[in-house]
Image: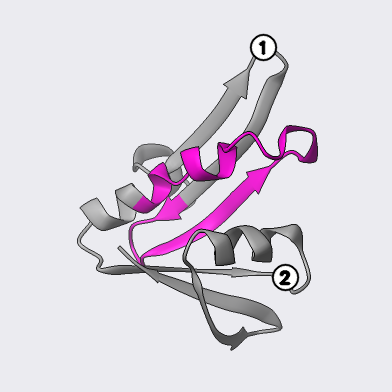
């Protein structure tokens, strides 16, 4: 269903006076984070951690762990390592991370 993400919880936006700084999105059907992006101009403002509300949404849906994928060699991989995500392998050319909730 194309509108599933509109009517279900899991999409969070960080916004300030300059506009949207970042957003995250969880999929409570499979326990994944399918989006976590912070505008480079707003790095080091702890927005990535604040956007982890998507993780809480997955936990509330009954999952004990959460997973995501990201392109190799991005600044996101450093963020995930620092935030306690564990690299578990490669999934279709992307790095596959998991974290206990």
Residue located farthest toward the bottom when viewing the structure as drawn: 89
Indicate yes or no whether the magenta region holds residue 29. Answer: yes
Q: Residue at the top extreme?
A: 17
Disc 1: which residue: 17
Q: Is residue 18 above or below residue 72?
A: above
Q: Are marks 1 and 2 in contact (CB under 8 Å)?
A: no
Q: Nearer the viewer, residue 55 or 61?
A: 55
What is the x, y in percent for residue 21? 67, 30
Crowdedness of circle 2 by 10 Å Cα count: few (<14), some, many (20+)? few
Residue 1 picture location, percent across and down? 43, 55
Q: Residues within 10 Å of mark 1 (few under 14, many from 20)?
A: few
Q: CA distance from mark 1 to mark 2?
A: 30 Å
Residue at x-position 47% and y-position 65%: 84
Of label 1 and label 2, which has the lower sequence position?
A: 1
- In the image, is residue 83 part of the stretch drawn in magenta? no
Q: Residue 71 got which mark?
A: 2
Residue range of the region highlighted in magenta in the rendering: 26-55
């Amino acid at each position: 269903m194309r509108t599933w993400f509109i009517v279900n919880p899991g999409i969070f936006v960080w916004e300030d006076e300059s506009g949207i700084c970042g957003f995250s999105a969880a999929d409570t059907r499979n326990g994944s984070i399918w989006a976590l992006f912070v505008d480079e101009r707003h790095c080091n403002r702890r927005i990535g951690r604040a956007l982890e509300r998507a993780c809480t949404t997955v936990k509330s849906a009954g999952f004990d762990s959460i997973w995501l994928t990201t392109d190799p060699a991005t600044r996101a991989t450093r963020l995930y390592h620092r935030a306690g995500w564990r690299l578990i392998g490669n999934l279709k050319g992307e790095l596959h991370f998991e974290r206990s909730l």
